[in-house]
Amino acid sequence: MPNVYLKTYGCQMNERDSEAVSAQLLAQGYSLVPTEDQADVILLNTCSVRDLAEQKALGKMSHLVNDSRQKPDVVFGFMGCMAQSRGSALLPRLPRKGLVVGTQKFHRTGEYLDRIRSGEAEKICDVAPEAGSESTIKEHLPPASLPNPKRRVSAYVSIMQGCNQRCAFCIVPDTRGKERSRPIAEIVDECRKLIAEGVREIVLLGQIVTSYGRREIGKKNGKSAFVQLIEAVHQLDGLERIRFTSPHPRGYGDDLIDAYPRLPKLCASAHLPVQSGSDRVLRLMRRGYTRERFLELIRKLRAARPQIGITTDIIAAFPGETETDFQETLSLVEEARFDNAFAFKYSPRRQTPAANWEQIPQAINEDRHSRLLAKVSEIGHQKYRQQLGRQVRILVEGPSRRNPDRLQGRTSCNKITVFEGDRRQIGELLDLRVHRIGSFTLYGDPL
Ligand code: SAH
Ligand code: F3S
Protein backbone atom coordinates (compact mmCIF):
# COMPACT_ATOMS: atom_id res chain seq x y z
CA MET A 1 0.00 0.00 0.00
CA PRO A 2 1.48 3.40 -0.94
CA ASN A 3 2.17 5.71 1.99
CA VAL A 4 0.89 9.29 1.89
CA TYR A 5 2.23 12.15 3.96
CA LEU A 6 -0.04 15.20 3.90
CA LYS A 7 0.92 18.46 5.61
CA THR A 8 -1.59 21.27 6.02
CA TYR A 9 -1.04 25.03 6.17
CA GLY A 10 -3.60 27.72 6.91
CA CYS A 11 -7.14 27.87 8.21
CA GLN A 12 -9.79 25.42 9.44
CA MET A 13 -11.18 25.02 5.92
CA ASN A 14 -7.78 23.69 4.85
CA GLU A 15 -7.66 21.33 7.81
CA ARG A 16 -11.07 20.06 6.82
CA ASP A 17 -10.13 19.68 3.12
CA SER A 18 -7.07 17.66 4.15
CA GLU A 19 -9.21 15.36 6.29
CA ALA A 20 -11.57 14.75 3.38
CA VAL A 21 -8.69 14.06 0.96
CA SER A 22 -7.09 11.72 3.52
CA ALA A 23 -10.37 9.86 3.96
CA GLN A 24 -10.73 9.48 0.18
CA LEU A 25 -7.14 8.24 -0.19
CA LEU A 26 -7.57 5.80 2.69
CA ALA A 27 -10.67 4.39 0.98
CA GLN A 28 -8.63 3.96 -2.21
CA GLY A 29 -6.02 1.82 -0.49
CA TYR A 30 -3.44 4.41 0.52
CA SER A 31 -1.98 4.48 4.05
CA LEU A 32 -1.55 7.74 5.91
CA VAL A 33 1.84 8.27 7.55
CA PRO A 34 2.71 10.94 10.11
CA THR A 35 6.15 11.83 8.68
CA GLU A 36 7.67 12.23 5.25
CA ASP A 37 10.46 9.63 5.71
CA GLN A 38 8.71 6.55 4.36
CA ALA A 39 6.23 8.33 2.13
CA ASP A 40 5.55 7.39 -1.49
CA VAL A 41 3.38 10.46 -1.90
CA ILE A 42 4.08 13.84 -0.26
CA LEU A 43 1.33 16.44 -0.44
CA LEU A 44 1.29 19.99 0.90
CA ASN A 45 -2.14 21.57 1.30
CA THR A 46 -1.30 25.25 1.02
CA CYS A 47 -2.49 28.71 2.09
CA SER A 48 -2.16 31.95 0.11
CA VAL A 49 -3.72 34.46 2.45
CA ARG A 50 -0.37 36.07 3.31
CA ASP A 51 2.95 35.80 1.52
CA LEU A 52 4.57 34.21 4.57
CA ALA A 53 2.21 31.21 4.33
CA GLU A 54 3.19 30.68 0.71
CA GLN A 55 6.90 31.01 1.47
CA LYS A 56 6.63 28.38 4.22
CA ALA A 57 5.09 25.80 1.88
CA LEU A 58 7.49 26.63 -0.95
CA GLY A 59 10.47 26.33 1.40
CA LYS A 60 9.18 23.03 2.77
CA MET A 61 8.69 21.61 -0.71
CA SER A 62 12.14 22.60 -1.89
CA HIS A 63 13.61 21.01 1.23
CA LEU A 64 11.59 17.83 0.60
CA VAL A 65 12.47 17.40 -3.06
CA ASN A 66 16.15 17.91 -2.28
CA ASP A 67 16.18 15.46 0.61
CA SER A 68 18.43 12.61 -0.52
CA ARG A 69 16.91 10.21 2.03
CA GLN A 70 13.66 10.33 0.08
CA LYS A 71 12.52 7.21 -1.77
CA PRO A 72 13.41 7.50 -5.48
CA ASP A 73 9.91 7.41 -6.91
CA VAL A 74 8.08 9.81 -4.62
CA VAL A 75 5.20 11.83 -6.07
CA PHE A 76 5.20 15.42 -4.78
CA GLY A 77 2.09 17.57 -4.84
CA PHE A 78 0.74 21.00 -4.02
CA MET A 79 -2.94 21.23 -3.18
CA GLY A 80 -5.29 23.98 -2.08
CA CYS A 81 -5.15 27.76 -2.27
CA MET A 82 -1.60 28.32 -3.52
CA ALA A 83 -2.02 25.49 -6.02
CA GLN A 84 -5.17 27.20 -7.26
CA SER A 85 -3.59 30.61 -7.44
CA ARG A 86 -0.23 29.68 -9.00
CA GLY A 87 -1.33 26.65 -11.00
CA SER A 88 1.11 25.14 -13.48
CA ALA A 89 3.76 27.71 -12.52
CA LEU A 90 4.38 25.38 -9.56
CA LEU A 91 5.23 22.35 -11.72
CA PRO A 92 8.92 23.23 -12.24
CA ARG A 93 9.30 23.10 -8.45
CA LEU A 94 8.33 19.42 -8.61
CA PRO A 95 11.28 18.00 -10.54
CA ARG A 96 10.15 14.40 -10.59
CA LYS A 97 6.59 13.15 -10.53
CA GLY A 98 4.36 16.06 -9.62
CA LEU A 99 0.78 17.02 -8.95
CA VAL A 100 -0.93 20.40 -8.60
CA VAL A 101 -4.58 20.20 -7.45
CA GLY A 102 -6.76 23.27 -7.09
CA THR A 103 -9.47 23.98 -4.52
CA GLN A 104 -12.30 22.57 -6.65
CA LYS A 105 -10.44 19.32 -7.39
CA PHE A 106 -9.52 17.84 -4.01
CA HIS A 107 -11.72 14.82 -4.69
CA ARG A 108 -9.70 13.97 -7.80
CA THR A 109 -6.42 13.64 -5.89
CA GLY A 110 -6.56 9.82 -5.67
CA GLU A 111 -7.37 9.39 -9.34
CA TYR A 112 -4.49 11.68 -10.37
CA LEU A 113 -2.04 9.98 -8.02
CA ASP A 114 -2.95 6.60 -9.50
CA ARG A 115 -2.30 7.92 -12.99
CA ILE A 116 1.06 9.35 -12.05
CA ARG A 117 2.13 6.29 -10.07
CA SER A 118 1.17 3.92 -12.89
CA GLY A 119 3.36 5.90 -15.29
CA GLU A 120 0.42 7.04 -17.39
CA ALA A 121 1.38 10.65 -16.65
CA GLU A 122 4.44 12.32 -15.11
CA LYS A 123 2.89 15.56 -14.02
CA ILE A 124 -0.71 16.66 -13.65
CA CYS A 125 -2.07 20.13 -12.91
CA ASP A 126 -5.81 20.65 -12.53
CA VAL A 127 -7.09 23.96 -11.21
CA ALA A 128 -10.23 24.23 -13.35
CA PRO A 129 -13.56 25.10 -11.72
CA GLU A 130 -15.96 22.21 -11.27
CA ALA A 131 -19.72 22.49 -10.80
CA GLY A 132 -20.83 20.79 -7.60
CA SER A 133 -17.36 20.75 -6.03
CA GLU A 134 -18.78 22.34 -2.84
CA SER A 135 -20.41 18.99 -2.09
CA THR A 136 -17.23 16.94 -2.47
CA ILE A 137 -15.76 17.79 0.94
CA LYS A 138 -17.90 15.32 2.87
CA GLU A 139 -15.89 12.21 3.78
CA HIS A 140 -14.54 11.92 7.31
CA LEU A 141 -11.69 9.82 8.60
CA PRO A 142 -12.40 6.99 11.03
CA PRO A 143 -11.88 8.50 14.52
CA ALA A 144 -8.61 6.59 15.07
CA SER A 145 -7.03 7.97 11.88
CA LEU A 146 -7.73 11.65 12.54
CA PRO A 147 -4.47 13.62 12.57
CA ASN A 148 -6.00 15.90 15.21
CA PRO A 149 -7.68 13.77 17.92
CA LYS A 150 -9.80 16.78 18.99
CA ARG A 151 -11.87 16.22 15.85
CA ARG A 152 -13.28 13.01 17.34
CA VAL A 153 -15.23 15.24 19.69
CA SER A 154 -15.50 18.47 17.73
CA ALA A 155 -15.85 17.91 13.99
CA TYR A 156 -15.51 20.36 11.14
CA VAL A 157 -18.21 20.36 8.48
CA SER A 158 -17.78 22.36 5.28
CA ILE A 159 -21.08 24.03 4.36
CA MET A 160 -20.04 26.21 1.44
CA GLN A 161 -17.13 27.22 -0.73
CA GLY A 162 -15.93 30.58 -1.97
CA CYS A 163 -16.61 34.23 -1.26
CA ASN A 164 -18.11 36.99 -3.42
CA GLN A 165 -17.08 39.96 -1.29
CA ARG A 166 -13.76 40.94 -2.84
CA CYS A 167 -12.33 42.87 0.08
CA ALA A 168 -9.49 44.97 -1.36
CA PHE A 169 -6.76 43.01 0.45
CA CYS A 170 -8.02 39.45 0.07
CA ILE A 171 -6.95 36.70 -2.32
CA VAL A 172 -9.60 34.23 -1.11
CA PRO A 173 -12.24 35.03 -3.79
CA ASP A 174 -9.60 34.03 -6.36
CA THR A 175 -8.37 30.92 -4.58
CA ARG A 176 -11.77 29.64 -3.46
CA GLY A 177 -13.99 30.87 -6.28
CA LYS A 178 -17.59 32.08 -6.20
CA GLU A 179 -19.95 31.32 -3.30
CA ARG A 180 -21.52 27.88 -3.62
CA SER A 181 -23.52 26.28 -0.81
CA ARG A 182 -24.42 22.69 -0.05
CA PRO A 183 -28.07 21.75 0.59
CA ILE A 184 -29.23 21.73 4.21
CA ALA A 185 -30.31 18.07 4.08
CA GLU A 186 -26.88 16.97 2.88
CA ILE A 187 -25.11 18.84 5.69
CA VAL A 188 -27.53 17.54 8.32
CA ASP A 189 -26.94 14.01 7.07
CA GLU A 190 -23.19 14.41 7.43
CA CYS A 191 -23.62 15.79 10.95
CA ARG A 192 -25.89 12.90 11.92
CA LYS A 193 -23.25 10.36 10.87
CA LEU A 194 -20.57 12.22 12.82
CA ILE A 195 -22.72 12.23 15.95
CA ALA A 196 -23.24 8.48 15.58
CA GLU A 197 -19.42 8.15 15.63
CA GLY A 198 -19.17 10.05 18.91
CA VAL A 199 -18.88 13.67 17.82
CA ARG A 200 -20.48 16.09 20.31
CA GLU A 201 -19.73 19.44 18.68
CA ILE A 202 -20.07 20.55 15.06
CA VAL A 203 -18.17 23.52 13.65
CA LEU A 204 -19.83 24.76 10.46
CA LEU A 205 -17.18 26.06 8.09
CA GLY A 206 -17.09 28.47 5.20
CA GLN A 207 -15.19 31.56 4.13
CA ILE A 208 -18.30 33.67 4.68
CA VAL A 209 -20.95 31.56 6.39
CA THR A 210 -23.35 34.50 6.75
CA SER A 211 -23.78 34.26 2.96
CA TYR A 212 -24.64 30.55 3.18
CA GLY A 213 -27.40 29.56 0.75
CA ARG A 214 -28.31 33.14 -0.11
CA ARG A 215 -29.10 32.24 -3.70
CA GLU A 216 -29.67 28.48 -3.45
CA ILE A 217 -32.02 28.51 -0.44
CA GLY A 218 -33.03 32.07 0.40
CA LYS A 219 -35.00 33.44 3.35
CA LYS A 220 -37.93 31.69 4.95
CA ASN A 221 -40.15 33.34 7.59
CA GLY A 222 -37.59 36.13 7.91
CA LYS A 223 -34.81 33.66 8.61
CA SER A 224 -31.70 33.52 6.47
CA ALA A 225 -30.62 30.20 4.98
CA PHE A 226 -27.75 30.10 7.49
CA VAL A 227 -30.12 30.35 10.46
CA GLN A 228 -32.33 27.67 8.88
CA LEU A 229 -29.25 25.45 8.66
CA ILE A 230 -28.29 26.06 12.30
CA GLU A 231 -31.84 25.22 13.37
CA ALA A 232 -31.78 21.98 11.38
CA VAL A 233 -28.45 20.90 12.87
CA HIS A 234 -29.65 21.99 16.33
CA GLN A 235 -32.43 19.39 16.20
CA LEU A 236 -30.01 16.47 16.03
CA ASP A 237 -30.12 14.29 19.13
CA GLY A 238 -26.80 13.61 20.77
CA LEU A 239 -25.30 16.88 19.58
CA GLU A 240 -24.26 19.19 22.42
CA ARG A 241 -22.73 22.18 20.71
CA ILE A 242 -22.71 24.12 17.45
CA ARG A 243 -20.09 26.66 16.37
CA PHE A 244 -19.39 28.32 13.06
CA THR A 245 -16.66 30.26 11.34
CA SER A 246 -16.33 32.75 9.74
CA PRO A 247 -19.25 35.12 9.58
CA HIS A 248 -19.05 38.57 7.98
CA PRO A 249 -20.20 41.50 10.14
CA ARG A 250 -22.21 42.84 7.21
CA GLY A 251 -24.32 39.69 6.88
CA TYR A 252 -24.73 39.19 10.65
CA GLY A 253 -28.46 39.85 10.75
CA ASP A 254 -30.89 40.10 13.66
CA ASP A 255 -32.15 36.61 12.82
CA LEU A 256 -28.69 35.23 13.64
CA ILE A 257 -28.42 37.32 16.82
CA ASP A 258 -31.89 36.13 17.89
CA ALA A 259 -30.71 32.53 17.43
CA TYR A 260 -28.44 32.82 20.50
CA PRO A 261 -31.07 33.00 23.23
CA ARG A 262 -33.32 30.59 21.32
CA LEU A 263 -30.87 27.79 20.53
CA PRO A 264 -29.06 26.50 23.61
CA LYS A 265 -26.60 24.34 21.64
CA LEU A 266 -25.31 27.40 19.80
CA CYS A 267 -22.10 28.26 21.64
CA ALA A 268 -21.69 31.65 23.29
CA SER A 269 -18.90 32.71 21.01
CA ALA A 270 -18.44 34.59 17.78
CA HIS A 271 -15.39 35.12 15.61
CA LEU A 272 -16.16 38.38 13.86
CA PRO A 273 -13.35 39.70 11.65
CA VAL A 274 -13.34 43.51 11.93
CA GLN A 275 -10.02 44.24 10.11
CA SER A 276 -9.81 47.92 11.17
CA GLY A 277 -11.31 50.44 13.57
CA SER A 278 -11.15 53.35 11.14
CA ASP A 279 -14.15 54.10 8.93
CA ARG A 280 -11.84 55.52 6.29
CA VAL A 281 -9.79 52.29 6.16
CA LEU A 282 -12.89 50.09 6.31
CA ARG A 283 -14.14 51.94 3.23
CA LEU A 284 -10.81 51.49 1.44
CA MET A 285 -10.93 47.80 2.34
CA ARG A 286 -14.51 47.58 0.92
CA ARG A 287 -15.82 45.92 4.05
CA GLY A 288 -19.34 47.30 3.80
CA TYR A 289 -19.79 48.39 7.44
CA THR A 290 -18.66 51.18 9.74
CA ARG A 291 -16.96 51.06 13.13
CA GLU A 292 -20.22 52.10 14.75
CA ARG A 293 -22.22 49.37 13.00
CA PHE A 294 -19.67 46.81 14.10
CA LEU A 295 -19.81 48.02 17.73
CA GLU A 296 -23.60 48.00 17.56
CA LEU A 297 -23.47 44.37 16.43
CA ILE A 298 -21.28 43.48 19.39
CA ARG A 299 -23.65 45.26 21.79
CA LYS A 300 -26.57 43.29 20.37
CA LEU A 301 -24.68 40.00 20.68
CA ARG A 302 -23.80 40.74 24.31
CA ALA A 303 -27.40 41.64 25.01
CA ALA A 304 -28.50 38.33 23.47
CA ARG A 305 -25.84 36.26 25.31
CA PRO A 306 -24.19 38.27 28.09
CA GLN A 307 -21.17 35.96 28.49
CA ILE A 308 -20.45 35.68 24.78
CA GLY A 309 -16.77 35.39 23.85
CA ILE A 310 -15.90 37.60 20.89
CA THR A 311 -12.73 37.26 18.84
CA THR A 312 -11.66 39.00 15.67
CA ASP A 313 -9.08 39.43 12.89
CA ILE A 314 -7.30 42.75 12.42
CA ILE A 315 -4.89 43.89 9.72
CA ALA A 316 -2.20 46.45 10.57
CA ALA A 317 -0.74 48.84 7.99
CA PHE A 318 -3.28 48.40 5.22
CA PRO A 319 -2.26 50.75 2.36
CA GLY A 320 -3.34 54.29 3.18
CA GLU A 321 -3.67 53.64 6.93
CA THR A 322 -2.40 56.70 8.83
CA GLU A 323 -1.23 56.76 12.44
CA THR A 324 -4.62 58.32 13.30
CA ASP A 325 -6.44 55.45 11.56
CA PHE A 326 -4.29 52.97 13.43
CA GLN A 327 -5.09 54.70 16.75
CA GLU A 328 -8.75 54.14 15.94
CA THR A 329 -8.06 50.43 15.56
CA LEU A 330 -6.38 50.39 18.99
CA SER A 331 -9.32 52.25 20.52
CA LEU A 332 -11.74 49.84 18.85
CA VAL A 333 -9.95 46.93 20.55
CA GLU A 334 -10.46 48.73 23.88
CA GLU A 335 -14.06 49.55 23.19
CA ALA A 336 -15.06 46.17 21.75
CA ARG A 337 -13.14 44.32 24.49
CA PHE A 338 -12.27 41.33 22.33
CA ASP A 339 -11.46 38.14 24.19
CA ASN A 340 -8.74 37.56 21.63
CA ALA A 341 -7.76 38.81 18.21
CA PHE A 342 -5.54 37.62 15.41
CA ALA A 343 -3.38 40.55 14.39
CA PHE A 344 -1.85 40.42 10.93
CA LYS A 345 0.69 42.53 9.11
CA TYR A 346 -0.78 43.59 5.81
CA SER A 347 0.68 41.46 3.03
CA PRO A 348 0.13 42.53 -0.60
CA ARG A 349 -1.53 39.75 -2.59
CA ARG A 350 -1.41 39.35 -6.36
CA GLN A 351 -4.45 40.50 -8.30
CA THR A 352 -5.98 42.32 -5.36
CA PRO A 353 -6.65 46.07 -5.65
CA ALA A 354 -4.71 47.09 -2.55
CA ALA A 355 -1.52 45.46 -3.79
CA ASN A 356 -1.25 48.24 -6.39
CA TRP A 357 -1.71 51.10 -3.93
CA GLU A 358 1.10 52.91 -2.17
CA GLN A 359 2.39 50.57 0.54
CA ILE A 360 3.22 51.38 4.15
CA PRO A 361 6.96 50.94 4.84
CA GLN A 362 7.83 47.59 6.39
CA ALA A 363 9.23 49.15 9.59
CA ILE A 364 5.94 50.96 10.27
CA ASN A 365 3.99 47.78 9.48
CA GLU A 366 6.04 45.84 12.04
CA ASP A 367 5.78 48.60 14.63
CA ARG A 368 1.98 48.85 14.31
CA HIS A 369 1.65 45.09 14.36
CA SER A 370 3.56 44.77 17.63
CA ARG A 371 1.63 47.64 19.24
CA LEU A 372 -1.58 45.97 18.12
CA LEU A 373 -0.48 42.64 19.57
CA ALA A 374 0.31 44.35 22.88
CA LYS A 375 -3.14 46.00 23.02
CA VAL A 376 -4.87 42.75 22.07
CA SER A 377 -3.15 40.80 24.81
CA GLU A 378 -3.71 43.55 27.40
CA ILE A 379 -7.47 43.48 26.78
CA GLY A 380 -7.51 39.71 26.30
CA HIS A 381 -5.83 39.14 29.64
CA GLN A 382 -8.31 41.41 31.38
CA LYS A 383 -11.12 39.39 29.84
CA TYR A 384 -9.52 36.09 30.80
CA ARG A 385 -8.84 37.27 34.36
CA GLN A 386 -12.56 37.90 34.79
CA GLN A 387 -13.00 34.13 34.54
CA LEU A 388 -10.97 33.50 37.68
CA GLY A 389 -13.06 31.71 40.32
CA ARG A 390 -15.93 31.21 37.92
CA GLN A 391 -17.68 27.97 37.21
CA VAL A 392 -17.44 26.93 33.57
CA ARG A 393 -18.78 24.02 31.58
CA ILE A 394 -16.39 22.53 29.09
CA LEU A 395 -16.57 19.88 26.42
CA VAL A 396 -13.53 17.67 26.99
CA GLU A 397 -11.59 17.32 23.73
CA GLY A 398 -8.49 15.32 24.62
CA PRO A 399 -4.98 15.62 26.01
CA SER A 400 -3.63 19.10 26.58
CA ARG A 401 -1.26 20.20 23.86
CA ARG A 402 1.48 21.34 26.20
CA ASN A 403 1.19 18.63 28.82
CA PRO A 404 -0.33 15.36 27.51
CA ASP A 405 -0.84 14.13 31.10
CA ARG A 406 -3.55 16.72 31.44
CA LEU A 407 -6.77 17.07 29.53
CA GLN A 408 -8.21 20.05 27.78
CA GLY A 409 -11.58 21.22 26.60
CA ARG A 410 -13.30 24.42 25.63
CA THR A 411 -15.85 26.58 27.33
CA SER A 412 -18.92 27.59 25.38
CA CYS A 413 -17.14 30.96 24.96
CA ASN A 414 -14.32 29.09 23.16
CA LYS A 415 -11.68 29.41 25.87
CA ILE A 416 -9.26 26.51 26.13
CA THR A 417 -9.40 25.06 29.63
CA VAL A 418 -6.83 22.63 31.04
CA PHE A 419 -7.46 20.30 33.99
CA GLU A 420 -6.31 17.07 35.67
CA GLY A 421 -8.64 14.32 34.58
CA ASP A 422 -9.20 10.93 33.18
CA ARG A 423 -9.19 10.04 29.50
CA ARG A 424 -12.60 8.46 29.90
CA GLN A 425 -13.94 12.01 30.27
CA ILE A 426 -13.10 12.82 26.64
CA GLY A 427 -16.31 13.72 24.83
CA GLU A 428 -18.13 14.65 28.04
CA LEU A 429 -19.41 17.96 29.31
CA LEU A 430 -17.73 18.79 32.60
CA ASP A 431 -18.15 21.56 35.16
CA LEU A 432 -14.98 23.14 36.48
CA ARG A 433 -13.98 25.98 38.77
CA VAL A 434 -11.31 28.19 37.20
CA HIS A 435 -8.38 28.47 39.62
CA ARG A 436 -5.65 29.93 37.44
CA ILE A 437 -5.28 31.98 34.27
CA GLY A 438 -2.49 31.35 31.78
CA SER A 439 -1.78 33.01 28.50
CA PHE A 440 -5.14 32.67 26.74
CA THR A 441 -5.75 29.48 28.73
CA LEU A 442 -7.89 28.73 31.79
CA TYR A 443 -6.92 26.13 34.39
CA GLY A 444 -9.75 24.48 36.28
CA ASP A 445 -10.61 21.96 38.95
CA PRO A 446 -13.50 19.56 38.30
CA LEU A 447 -16.46 20.28 40.60
N1 SAH B 1 -13.56 35.22 5.62
C1 SAH B 1 -12.34 34.48 5.87
C2 SAH B 1 -11.15 35.30 5.64
C3 SAH B 1 -10.00 34.45 5.40
S1 SAH B 1 -8.54 35.29 5.58
C4 SAH B 1 -12.31 34.03 7.29
O1 SAH B 1 -12.65 34.82 8.18
O2 SAH B 1 -11.90 32.91 7.56
C5 SAH B 1 -8.41 35.32 7.36
C6 SAH B 1 -7.90 36.61 7.84
O3 SAH B 1 -6.63 36.88 7.26
C7 SAH B 1 -8.76 37.80 7.42
O4 SAH B 1 -9.83 38.00 8.29
C8 SAH B 1 -7.78 38.93 7.47
O5 SAH B 1 -7.71 39.52 8.76
C9 SAH B 1 -6.45 38.26 7.19
N2 SAH B 1 -5.97 38.62 5.84
C10 SAH B 1 -6.58 38.37 4.68
N3 SAH B 1 -5.86 38.90 3.67
C11 SAH B 1 -4.78 39.48 4.20
C12 SAH B 1 -3.67 40.20 3.69
N4 SAH B 1 -3.56 40.44 2.39
N5 SAH B 1 -2.72 40.64 4.56
C13 SAH B 1 -2.85 40.41 5.88
N6 SAH B 1 -3.87 39.76 6.42
C14 SAH B 1 -4.83 39.29 5.61
FE1 F3S C 1 -11.72 37.58 2.06
FE2 F3S C 1 -13.40 39.54 2.56
FE3 F3S C 1 -14.28 37.21 1.62
S1 F3S C 1 -11.75 38.86 3.88
S2 F3S C 1 -12.82 35.72 2.34
S3 F3S C 1 -12.99 38.68 0.55
S4 F3S C 1 -15.25 38.52 3.18
Image (tube, rainbow, N blue to C red):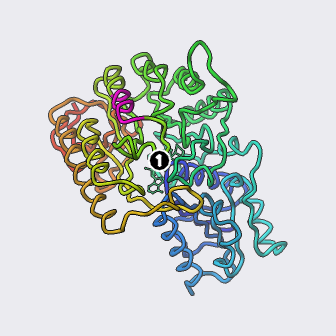
**Residue 174 can be seen, yes or no:** yes
| Left-right relation of 333 to 286 | left
Query: Most extreme residue toward the top, as rendered?
Result: 221
Q: Position of residue 371 (x, y in %)?
A: 24, 56
Snapshot quadrant of residue 397: top left
| Left-right relation of 131 to 413 | right
- Magenta span covers which residues? 290-298
Q: Position of residue 390 (x, y in %)?
A: 18, 30
| Left-right relation of 299 to 184 | left
Q: Position of residue 139 (x, y in %)?
A: 65, 45
At x 39%, y 40%, the residue is 426
Under circle 1, the secondary element is helix
Tally the numbered discs.
1
**Residue 189 falls inside the magenta stretch:** no
Q: In this figure, which residue is indicated by the disc labeled 1?
A: 285
Of residues 423 and 201, the one nearer the viewer is 201
**Residue 297 falls inside the magenta stretch:** yes
